[in-house]
Amino acid sequence: MTQTIEDLFDTGLERYKAGESVSSLIPVFKQVCDRSPRSSSAWVCLAWLYLLDNQGKLAYTAANKAVKLNPQDPQARINLALAMLETGQKGLRQHIDIAQQLIFVNEEWQDEVKNSIEDGLTRKPDWQSLIKVKKWLFEE
């Protein structure tokens, strides 16, 4: 029996939270994105995994799709800004500004973003791009 997209996504998230390696989860989220290409949350997760795996160009592509599908998702914007930083692209400030505005008006999103940043720094402690983004979002 084939897993539903939702089951595959939820299982992938559970495996991620349990500490499974990023490289083993990328194919899971690629499959979710292939089977449900309009799922912005799947693209957000895939972009994040690519970022953690030092695959900036693939992260940029995935994050860009996530932002196009849901421009009001602060994590999608943050992932795109991170991917732009990682690949040396210009124009990331607008994504930081929009993410800042979104998390300013929604405390739940702010908590999710803070948790995501802490998770990223736990998994990749000297992630300079994420450290910069964290400062831009919360210290300016």
Image (spheres, grey):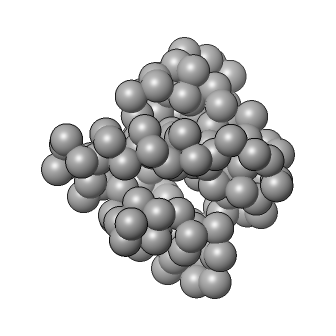
The residue depicted at 65 percent of the width and 31 percent of the height is 64
Identify the residue at image location x=46%, y=33%. 41
Q: Is residue 27 above or below residue 134?
A: above
Quadrant location of the C terminus?
bottom left
Q: Position of residue 60 (x, y in %)?
A: 73, 41
Note whether residue 17 is visible: no
| Quadrant of the rendered image containing residue 127 | bottom right
Q: Nearer the viewer, residue 103 or 7?
A: 103
Query: Where residue 24 sits in the image (x, y, percent)?
Result: 69, 57
User: Which residue is outermost to the bottom?
Assistant: 126
* Left or right of 117 on screen, residue 115: left
Q: Quadrant of residue 85?
A: bottom right
At 63% from the left edge and 26% from the top edge, which residue is drawn? 65
- Residue 22: x and y in percent read 65, 61
Can residue 84 be seen from the camera position used here?
yes
Q: Is residue 73 above or below residue 34?
A: below
Q: Residue at x 63, y 55 (%)?
A: 82
Q: How many numbered tags mark residues here? A: 0
Left or right: 17, with 79 as reference point: left
Residue furthest to the front: 140
- Percent x, y of residue 92: 64, 45
